[in-house]
Image (cartoon, grey):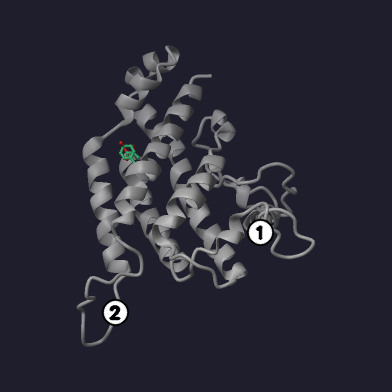
Amino acid sequence: MAGSDPFSLESIRNSLIRQEDTIIFSLIERAKYPLNPQLYDSRCSIFPGIAGSLLENFVKETEAIQAKFGRYQSPEENPFFPDNLPDSLVPPQSHPQVLHPGAASININKTIWDIYINKLLPLFASEGHDENYMCISACDLECLQALSRRIHYGKFVAEVKFKDAPEEYSPAIHAKDRDALMKLLTFESVEEMVKKRVEKKAKVFGQEVTLNNDDCNGKFKIDPSVLPRLYGEWVMPLTKHVEVEYLLRRLD
Ligand SMILES: C=C(O[C@@H]1C=C(C(=O)O)C=C[C@H]1O)C(=O)O
């Protein structure tokens, strides 16, 4: 919006709202395929010469290419496999420096990976396998990156909340009081709205669209009830965890 502050709580929340669309569309794409559990099994070598989980290999190699083209120069992006990433081939991009430098040390992608594969996928992917490994890996990476971006966006949320009320946050930061920080940054009414909205979006985005019949017979491309659960149990608690971690470093 012209004239609006790009770094206000409102604009940060608008970005989170837009990221909901990305997450839901990426889950709808993944839901086209069955689970294919061997893709995630580190003991199951699907192709000779590729040891470990195929998805892990795929993500590591893809992140290496994306690192070369500057993806991780952006403070919004966090790699799943940060060790030994190649240097960027592109010159440094001018990303606005809004975050405290301590933000760079916060990366909870291991937790996000584990939840995505072990808890979330079984909630919406049908059982079975079709060996469509590369298409599925590409979908998984989209989902993982969208979730990771959203959850690590907590760094920006925390920065704007701190800037808006440093006198409220500073004592809890000095005291390293995680519970007090969690209380300060939590808005339960916002969280309730988020859960309702993502369920509605899953219904709208996941309906069958035809020219003459809008009745979807209760059938959706992804079960809409998965979305409030994903957000209520994992996405919002992890975003708040990132917010607390960021705030604890904010005055270093
Ligand atoms: C992100 C925010 O902080 C907290 C986390 C929320 C979320 O992850 O969606 C929502 C409300 C807050 O409890 C916010 O205030 O918008």
**Which residue is rendered at x = 55% and y = 45% of the image?**
95
Task: Give the answer, above or below, for where 218 lies relative to 230.
Answer: below
> Residue 156's quadrant in the figure?
top left
Q: Which residue is mark 1?
A: 54
Q: Quadrant of the N terminus?
A: bottom left
Q: Quadrant of residue 217?
A: bottom left
Vertical position of residue 229 compared to residue 185: above or below? below
Q: Looking at the image, can residue 221 be seen?
A: yes
Say which of 138 and 152 sits in front: 138
Q: Position of residue 215 (x, y in %)?
A: 20, 78
Whether label 1 lies within 8 Å of ligand 1 gets the answer no
- Residue under the image location 56 percent in, 28 percent down: 102
What's under tag 1, amino acid-wise?
A: Leu
Q: Residues within 10 Å of mark 1 (few under 14, many from 20)?
A: many
Residue 178 position within the rendered picture, expressed as x and y whole percent measured from the top left: 40, 21
Q: Nearer the viewer, residue 107 or 140?
A: 140
Q: Is residue 174 left or right of residue 83?
A: left
Q: Which residue is mark 2?
A: 209
Q: Nearer the viewer, residue 14 or 179?
A: 179
Disc 2, SS: loop
The type of residue carrying mark 2 is Val
Relative to 172, is 144 above or below?
below
Say which element carries label 1: helix
Residue 241, placed above or below residue 66: above
Tell me which image quadrant ligand 1 sits in: top left
Residue 77 in the image: x percent, y percent? 55, 47
Q: Residue at x 30, y 55 (%)?
A: 198
